[in-house]
Image (spheres, helix red, strand yellow):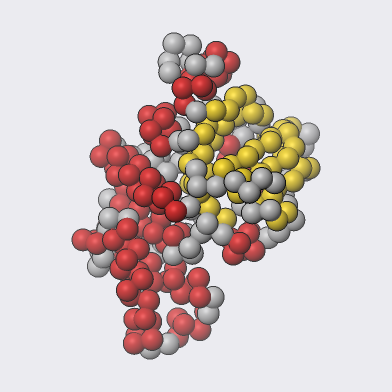
Amino acid sequence: MSADIILETEDLTKEFAGFAAVGGVDLRVRRGSIHALIGPNGAGKTTCFNLLTKFLSPTRGRIVFKGQDITAMQPADVARLGLVRSFQISAVFPHMTVLENVRIALQRLRGNSMDFWRSRAVLDQYNDRAMALIADVGLTEFTNWAAVELPYGRKRALEIATTLALDPEMLLLDEPTAGMGHEDIDRISQLIRRVAANRTVLMVEHNLSVVSDLSDTITVLTRGRVLAEGDYETVSNNPDVREAYMGVGHA
């Protein structure tokens, strides 16, 4: 695997009762890039994410991360290598504050469950790093809010903060702007750009304006297979993509 490729799949396939939800996908994600995975409903995007993060095992094929074959690894082991999927692995407790949520995520990185039984003074050692993460995702003014009280977009930012507490080298984002209004979409897009400054991001995203604004490379899936790949201009002008995903005349 080339040194500039952080994640690669070969013939990645997942069949359910003979139906190929993902069929022969060859994916190459460049280190330090923002790579988008798009396609119509049922294209296999979420199944592909589940395969990459080991929540599903492939029927056949291979997954290589940082030069290491991770095809047979468990999800926790893959996360420890630095490949982390946001919104599934992140732990957001609704009745704890923003600070408490991020601090718990930092404790989890340390890997010592006994920390939960220690004194407040011991746990306070995490506060500086937690506050830095909270500032990074624009939640400083919400530090003492309970997670359940946060507006939807801010809750998503908290989920990203708890994932960043694991210090991932590569972050997988599944529909990061789903269900958001324009203001929240802009805020989360800016956050993703900041997060990607020193790590790789692979995201599934339906909002094409977000995809065009953020992505270095776009892979288009349809019926579980790669239809096209390239930058936004390349894929948006591909007639097969326009027909299968965007609709003829919609770029």
Q: Is residue 233 above or below residue 224?
A: above
Residue 188 pos. (x, y %): 34, 45
- Where residue 209 sits, quadrant-wise, is top left
Residue 5 pos. (x, y %): 61, 45
Give the residue at x 28% y 61%. Answer: 135
Q: Is residue 3 above or below residue 142?
A: above
Residue 31 pos. (x, y %): 55, 47
Residue 176 pos. (x, y %): 42, 44
Give the residue at x 78% y 42%. Answer: 60
Residue reaching furthest front? 3
Count of numbered circles in the view:
0
- Where residue 116 sits, quadrant-wise, is bottom left
Give the residue at x 52% y 57%. Answer: 169
Q: Is residue 24 above or below residue 87?
A: above
| Residue 68 appears in the figure | yes
Q: Would residue 218 be found to the left or right of residue 250 on screen?
A: right
Q: Would residue 137 be found to the left or right of residue 25 on screen?
A: left
Give the residue at x 32% y 74%. Answer: 128
Q: Nearer the viewer, residue 17 or 209?
A: 209
Q: Quadrant of the C terminus?
A: top left
Residue reaching furthest left? 141
| Residue 148 appears in the figure | no
Q: Would residue 121 be found to the left or right of residue 172 on screen?
A: left
